[in-house]
């Protein structure tokens, strides 16, 4: 498997925080190979979307700094803010976002929005563009001929998300970043979109970064996972290892919140749901571990120093004092 | 009365809410913007909800769940059917009677960012229903506002914050405080937990269960998430293309 993306020491800060040393992301390092699915797991405000935008080179204007190295297929690309994205990077990394209706142009027919991508990347005649766009839609399960000529509002949310996936695939990207692609969809549609993405990764030998707040989705889907908390990678490893033996107290607490499918008010005898007490820290530089105030296993040192990155025997790594200094 | 409703309930306990053969249709325009057609949101929906009970309602997007929720608080007028709440037919009430009946049923929405006025501070947001329903003196309202904030486990320092300064979970707590202001007996939770992270979802669900026990509230819990509904509700109904069935 060839390496598609290698990120090392990525840090991003926004200019709206008063403190100049505040960061949205810090010390982010990971790799993704072709044909691989990396699941990025984190709760709201942890920096998931900032990471997606930094990788795609679409950070917003209020970015104060973006440093670190991002290598795309062995070529170094800038982490910073771009006035205009280079065509090359735009077709290699494509992001699909949470709200499909916001990513599609409401006044252009669906088929045309896919044809646009083909025209930008190829020198095909009209018939070829139309045929390819139709075939792509059909391959994503949008077999109905009328969908090509429909406007986005005339199709369902699940269909809209399939169209944005088609748009992304038309560029033949090496890396697809899906940022909470199923958050606005119901559970049946969610399952079908996840299955579709998994099939596409196998068929097209793409790399996929799937960003979500819901650990349940990643099971049986992603090969490796990266847990983000307050802008830092607190745990990283193969999904099987991390889910079976979570090392960081946050990871165990988060996985503990997954509901058993058979869970009901009666089986719980009226007991309350498992939660993580407190809330994540705001974007302020902290002394020590960012999880310290909520951690059930905190040590004296946790509030004083930044915890070290510890590698376990398997390729699992964790940022925590519990596993040595 | 109970036997008439779609779901039979024990004769002794008269249901708090009893919905009978409720039908709602919308007038939709075709793509040419001229031709109109009638779209049925739901038809002949009947169910009953007992005091202190949590009734779950699941269904895929677009099945009519939210239309039903809006009907129950009379944001929409149904075409046919009856809504009985505590022995009163809500659809037959006069405007003045309706105002007091409306205190009893409150609706909480999914997206707290759009449900709360972005220009208001938490103090005004929570006090608004109290002011509209003339709860009492200014001091009385201020005291009640603080009490409500305490009930949803938010510190008094939040009184001066605006919605965008709060996290999703904190905003949903404000929405709950607002809904509880007039001491309702029934809360309709329309996807109220769906936009939250898993751990926050648990926190808010626990808060709702605590409040239910404390104030003997009843819930109509609407969601597309079967696992969540099953985990929180005493009984579960499913809505499919405008028809309601009870799941065992």
Image (tube, coloured by chain):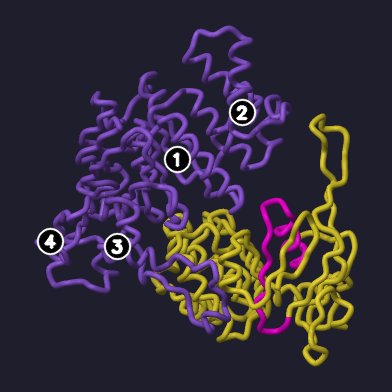
Question: Are discs 4 and 2 less than 8 Å apart at CB?
Answer: no
| Element under disc 4 | loop
Q: Which residue is mark 2?
A: A137
* Pointers 4 and 2 within a single chain: yes
| Between marks 4 and 2 in the image, the one whose residue lies nearer the viewer | 2
Q: Residues within 10 Å of mark 3 (few under 14, many from 20)?
A: many
Chain hosting mark 2: A
Number of residues whose C-alpha sits closer than 10 Å to that of mark 4, classed few (under 14), some (14–19) or many (20 or more): few
Chain of the residue displaying label 4: A
**Residue at image mark 1:** A178
The picture quadrant where one finds residue A11 is top left
Callout 2 touching callout 1 (CB < 8 Å): no
Looking at the figure, which quarter contains the C terminus of chain B? bottom right
The answer, for residue A87, to whether it is visible in the render is yes
Disc 1/disc 3 C-alpha distance (Å): 24 Å
| Marks 3, 4 in one chain | yes
Total numbered circles: 4
Query: In this figure, which residue is indicated by the disc labeled 4?
Result: A305
- CA gap, disc 1 and disc 4: 34 Å
Residue at disc 1, secondary structure = strand
Which residue occupies 70% across, 25% down?
A149
Q: Is residue B133 left or right of residue A202?
A: right
Q: Earlier in the sequence, mark 3 or mark 4?
A: 3
**On screen, residue A26 above or below B180:** above
Q: Who comes first in sequence, dot 2 or dot 1? A: 2
> Are discs 1 and 3 both within one chain?
yes
Q: How far apart are labels 4 and 2 at the CA level?
A: 52 Å
Q: Over which residues does the magenta segment extend?
A: B50-74
């Amino acid at each position: 498997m060839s390496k598609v993306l290698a990120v090392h020491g990525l840090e991003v800060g926004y200019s709206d925080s008063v403190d100049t040393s505040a960061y949205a992301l810090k010390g982010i390092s990971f790799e993704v190979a072709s044909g691989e699915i990396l699941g990025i797991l984190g709760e709201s405000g942890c920096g998931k979307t900032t990471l997606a935008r930094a990788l795609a080179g679409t950070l917003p204007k209020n970015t104060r700094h973006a440093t670190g190295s991002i290598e795309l297929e062995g070529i170094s690309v800038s982490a910073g803010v771009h006035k205009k994205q280079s065509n090359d990077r735009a077709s290699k990394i494509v992001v699909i976002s949470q709200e499909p209706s916001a990513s599609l142009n409401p006044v252009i027919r669906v088929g045309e929005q896919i044809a646009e991508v083909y025209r930008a990347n190829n020198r095909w005649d009209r018939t070829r563009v139309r045929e390819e766009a139709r075939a792509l839609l059909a391959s994503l399960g949008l077999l109905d001929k009328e969908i090509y000529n429909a406007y986005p509002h005339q199709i369902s949310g699940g269909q809209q998300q399939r169209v944005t996936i088609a748009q992304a695939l038309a560029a033949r990207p090496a890396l697809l970043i899906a940022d909470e692609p199923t958050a606005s969809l119901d559970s049946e549609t969610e399952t079908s979109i996840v299955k579709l993405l998994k099939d596409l990764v196998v068929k097209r030998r793409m790399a996929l970064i799937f960003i979500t707040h819901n650990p349940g989705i990643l099971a049986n889907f992603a090969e490796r996972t990266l847990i983000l908390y307050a802008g830092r990678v607190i745990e990283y490893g193969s999904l099987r290892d991390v889910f079976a033996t979570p090392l960081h107290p946050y990871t165990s607490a988060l996985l503990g919140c997954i509901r058993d499918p058979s869970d009901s008010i009666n089986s719980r005898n009226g007991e309350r749901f498992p939660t993580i007490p407190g809330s994540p820290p705001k974007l302020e530089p902290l002394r020590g571990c960012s999880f310290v105030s909520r951690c059930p296993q905190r040590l004296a040192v946790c509030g004083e120093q930044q915890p070290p990155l510890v590698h376990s025997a398997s390729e699992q790594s964790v940022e925590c004092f519990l596993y040595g200094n | 009365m109970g036997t008439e409703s779609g779901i039979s309930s024990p004769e002794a306990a008269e249901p708090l809410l009893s919905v009978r053969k409720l039908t709602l249709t919308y007038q939709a325009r075709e793509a040419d913007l001229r031709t109109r057609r009638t779209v049925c949101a739901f038809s002949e929906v009947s169910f009953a909800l007992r005091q202190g009970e949590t009734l779950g309602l699941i269904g895929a997007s677009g099945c009519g769940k939210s239309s039903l929720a809006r009907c129950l608080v009379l944001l929409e007028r149904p075409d046919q059917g009856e809504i009985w709440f505590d022995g009163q037919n809500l659809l037959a009430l006069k405007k003045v009677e309706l105002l007091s009946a409306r205190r009893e049923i409150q609706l909480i929405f999914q997206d707290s960012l759009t449900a709360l006025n972005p220009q208001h501070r938490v103090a005004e947001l929570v006090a608004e229903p109290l002011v509209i329903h003339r709860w009492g003196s200014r001091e009385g309202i201020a005291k009640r506002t603080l009490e409500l904030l305490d009930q949803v486990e938010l510190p008094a320092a939040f009184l001066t914050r605006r919605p965008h300064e709060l996290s999703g979970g904190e905003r949903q707590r404000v929405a709950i405080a607002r809904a509880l202001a007039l001491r309702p007996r029934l809360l309709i939770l329309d996807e109220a937990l769906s936009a939250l992270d898993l751990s926050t979802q648990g926190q808010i669900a626990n808060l709702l269960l605590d409040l239910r026990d404390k104030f003997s509230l009843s819930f109509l819990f609407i969601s597309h998430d079967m696992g969540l509904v099953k985990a929180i509700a005493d009984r579960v109904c499913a809505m499919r293309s405008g028809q309601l069935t009870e799941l065992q």
